Amino acid sequence: MAPTSLADSDPFVDPVNSVSDDDYTEAWTLPVGRSASLTLATDSLIVLEAKTTQAIPFFNILWAELSDFDITVKYAKPTAKNVVRVASINYLVEKPQRSYAQSWVTKLLDRAYGESQRKKRIKVLINPFGGSGSAQKWYLRDIEPIFAAAGCEIDAERTLYQGHAVEIAEKLDIEAYDVIASCSGDGLPHEVFNGLGKKHDATKALSKVAVVQLPCGTGNAMSWNLNGTGSTSLAALCVVKGIRTPLDLTSITQGDKRTLSFLSQSLGIVAEVDLGTEHLRWMGSARFTYGFLVRVLRKTVYPCDLWVKIDIPTKGAIREHYRKELTNHAPVEERRDSDNAENPGLPELQYGSIASPLPSSFTNIPSSNVGNFYAGNMALMAPDANFFPATLPSDGHLDLITVGGDISRHSAIKCFLAVEKGGFFDFPQVNYRKISGYRIIPRGQKGGYISIDGERVPFEGFQAEVHRGLGTVLSKTGHLYEAEGVVPKSG
């Protein structure tokens, strides 16, 4: 027969005062107030009161603390579609349970944060000119309260001109911050990576300080890939809970200049549709569709000379490579090139620059009729534009797409529609390779558009080289993007 406690035998004994810590440990339930309890379930905190029950996902828990008489739990509460706001619950805790309550709070925070660093020290950069000019308002309304509730240390600064973020990042004390968060589009993270890359200890800086985006611009690809959202408040929550993730960066040499790219490089129809339709911004996202259709109807081609360091040449091998990475949970240090640490500045260029002799390991790809040259380091270039479904944050490869400009108009339109609907990767006219470097030189054109991370650069030849895990970001998983891949993430 099981032993009977005093509380079981005497109805006048308060069960709260007679139950030991061990009685709660198995279920991790904390009695609070007069008739409520807090239970740590599989993936959420269950708040049980006399007439109501509430489940708060651990991911939404921002902080919890025990004071002299009560317990407070702060969390991100959904208030509308894709919007969360800071909320809290507070209950009295009886004195005999304080020891257990402290252990319970520790357990809650362990489950709420997992691998993620708590109380991050965040340098916030606000671009008041980007997007609709609302970044400052969105930061104060949607972002700052979540950071504050999670106990983050915040140092916010507005950028005043193009290139200002480069200067701020270059001068940043990397021992004082864990994260640089850009309230902007994709342009500010590009500047931040390049600012860190200018430091005398660039490799250390890029590995130590995580670069993140809080989506306040017209192009928010970084947030969509790493956070799975374009919502400012949800992105703030994702930064609070983000796991440090190595990110491949690509050195671009053009003329005598070396820059870092984190997102993509393009020449051809994508670059023209993006950069060549700036005067049609009043059309919203429809300007991209319009720009594409105009060029398809003209069957525009962009001849160039192209040499590539091909690593994985076929779609079948790429799919298998991606499948293996789904279950690869190697430590952070194993997701970076060991060569990166050998130089205090940026890694040496293994393939030289655009001015160097052509590397013998590069293969020539006939490109007289290229319609689209597109190299990507992230999957989503826009919420519904999964051009690179096989990309991985730190596999040491860029994903390269080439599509002929002389394919039929019908095929070109089907190809365009497949980006949004899925199936683009398997489309027969899409050449898809994993590469670690390339050289491309436009040929027979007086002018045109080349885009690096969405920014226009001179229309002239350049060379690219991938550095595995040189940068650092925050993501939900620590090793995958949030986009749909070429293999289902369930296996």
Image (cartoon, rainbow, N blue to C red):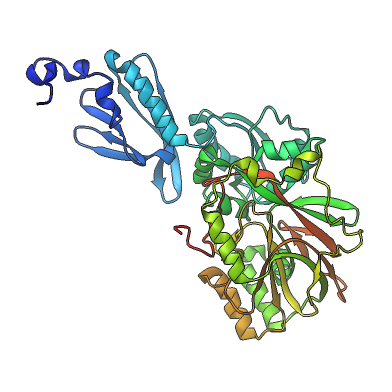
Q: Which residue is depicted at the point 39% across and 26% down?
A: 105
Specify the farthest residue to the front. Answer: 1
The quadrant in which residue 64 appears is: top left
Q: Position of residue 200 (x, y in %)?
A: 82, 35
Q: Is residue 188 above or below residue 107?
A: below
Drawn side of residue 86 relative to residue 446, left or right: left
Task: Inspect this view and state whether residue 31 appears.
Answer: no
Drawn side of residue 448 relative to residue 378, left or right: right
Q: Position of residue 384 (x, y in %)?
A: 54, 64
Q: Is residue 257 above or below residue 382?
A: above
Which quadrant, please, contains the N terminus?
top left
Nearer to us in this view, 55 or 101: 101
The quadrant in which residue 380 appears is: bottom right
Drawn side of residue 336 relative to residue 60, left or right: right
Q: Is residue 194 above or below residue 344?
A: below
Nearer to us in this view, 326 or 399: 326
Numbered label tally: 0
Q: Is residue 107 above or below residue 266?
A: above
Task: Inspect this view and state whether residue 226 appears.
Answer: yes
Q: Which residue is depicted at the point 64% across and 54% down?
A: 395
The quadrant in which residue 286 appears is: bottom right
Q: Which residue is depicted at the point 71% across and 62% down?
A: 435
Q: Position of residue 333 (x, y in %)?
A: 64, 41
Q: Position of residue 321 (x, y in %)?
A: 59, 61
